[in-house]
Image (cartoon, helix red, strand yellow):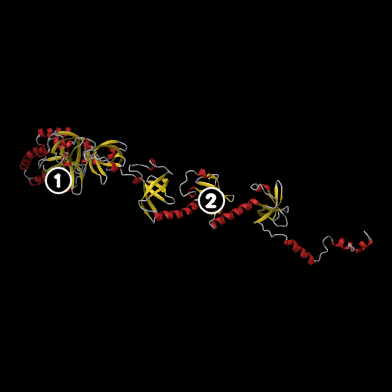
Amino acid sequence: MSKTQQRELPAFDWDRADNKGFGSGYSDAERNRLQELYDNTLSEVKEKEVVMGTVVGITDREVLLNIGFKSDGLVPASEFRDMPDLKMGDEIEVYVENQEDPNGQLVLSRKKAKVITAWQKIQKALDDDLVIDGFVKRRTKGGLIVDIFSIEAFLPGSQIDVKPIRDFDIFVGKKMEVKVVKINYANDNVVVSHKVLIEKDLEAQRAQILNNLEKGQVLEGVIKNMTNFGVFIDLGGVDGLLHITDISWGRISHPSEVLHLDQKVNVVVLDFDEDKKRISLGMKQLQAHPWDALPEDIQVGSKVEGKIVNVADYGAFLEIMPGVEGLIHVSEMSWSQHLRNPQEFLKVGDDVQAVVLTLDRADRKMSLGIKQLTEDPWTRPELREKYAVGTKHKGVVRNLTNFGLFLELEEGIDGLVHVSDLSWTKKIKHPSDFIKVGEELEVVVLELDIENRRLALGHKQLEENPWDTFETVFAVGTTHRCTIISKNDKMATLELPYGIEGFSSLKNLSKEDGSFAEVGETLDFKVTEFSKEEKRIMLSHTKTWQEKNEPAKEQKPKAASTKTSSSTNQPERGATLGDLDALAALKEQLEGRN
């Protein structure tokens, strides 16, 4: 260096350098200006926020990001596995966890940034009713799990399509457009729907179908649901009901017998309600009615064969050809008058032969009978002799009523035993007190009316009327030992000898000591009234002691008179014994019957 050049260099003040240190030579104004320039190169960064960062360094373990802060931040490389093509200069969203950790390092997280951003996008999709792309990851109970913005959302099975979906697995691993319908931040739960997208597309189509709908119109549809009462058919955005009775002219118990899900079918519109959007459909109406093919040779009196397809309380339906049925009323199943339940006679699936009783081709109605295949028992010529008045028979009790019982002597031949014809001696209020349904009873024919199919029977007539003998045994004035078996407000019922009943008014129950006889007591009673026609015997205990005491009071001074009185009463006492032979025979007869 020349001397001229050395003279041009400014002199360096070593004292100033030693005393003030490096950078200490700035004035306050210069220092403030430099500080402002430095601060302007940095961004204001707040913790717990998502910011954009630029990749400034990549290693096997970490990615270095510049977010405009005074220092760069490190993010584990594992958080970038979904970005295999990551390179320098790429801009990435990151979450600021901490501006400065104990080591003075800026702490960032891409994973948390993705979650926060995803929830923001999901909320925006719900608020703005946006359609978003999802990926079906797997099926779960009741639906599917769909990935949207790396968040797992639930897609209910009912929200997959407008028609029921039976196999969810066909959607797994596929993309699907959905809409967010519900967010629950407390449980980090998101519910999405694909069905709402389809419904929106179908609204216009549904409106067009309803506007053009007419009765009698034939449409093509797909069976989407099946129930016991019918099937629901998708007509292309609007559903119609095909009732089970409109599927086939023949009787079916369930639609699955002739149809299956997802089957395409042609149907005719039977009726529709524009307000309620209800459409009634028919399928059998597209075919000719089977009654139109009913052979002309089938007339009243013809014999037909078929299968029982239904049994009701009032009868059974016989299908003689598909779609052609006739009713067999319960009264036409048997000549017996006691068949009450058709199920005791027929069951579904039985092959039956019957006779046509009525036939109306216009109204498509037919009544049938089975009993007509056999002879009417009331028309048999030997019936008049077999059941002549006075003949004895045995039958089975089939029915009990208040006025009597019906006895079946043979199939189709019934007779009535009136309650008054059951017993000579007992007053029977209801036949159930005497016999039960199903038991046998021996009877005698009292009256036969073949024209009106009536047969009057009697049971007590098998024996002689004991009241002819009772008229002598229980003559008025005779005394008998009786037991009180019941009492009411006006009368007491007594059990007399030979098992018959008598009656006494309450005032005639007074005893000599002033008290009244009670139920269960056995005392002497005097007959005060005897009615053979009404089979009634009235008695009095009071008279047994009153009549004994009254003569004693009047004749007390005259002993001879008392003896005469005793002698006078002797024949009456003898009358109480009656005819010993008749009583013995009657007792033997009653004991033998019981």
**Rendered location of residue 510, percent (x, y):** 17, 47
Please determine whether, in this image, residue 289 is positioned above or below residue 380.
below
- Using the image as rendered, state which of residue 461 and residue 176 is in the foreground: 176
Q: Secondary structure at mark 2?
A: strand
Task: State the image quarter where residue 483 is shown.
Answer: top left
Side (left or right) of 269 relative to 386: right
Side (left or right) of 546 relative to 401: left
Residue 512 visible: no
Q: Which residue is mark 1?
A: 542
Q: Which residue is mark 2?
A: 177
Please determine whether, in this image, residue 131 is positioned above or below residue 358.
below
Q: What count of labels does the image hold?
A: 2
Q: Which mark is residue 30?
A: none
Side (left or right) of 113 relative to 426: right
Comparing marks 2 and 1, which lies closer to the viewer? 2
Image quadrant holding the C terminus, namely: top left
Residue 491 visible: yes
Badge 1 amino acid = Thr
Please determine whether, in this image, residue 335 is positioned above or below residue 116.
above
Badge 2 amino acid = Glu
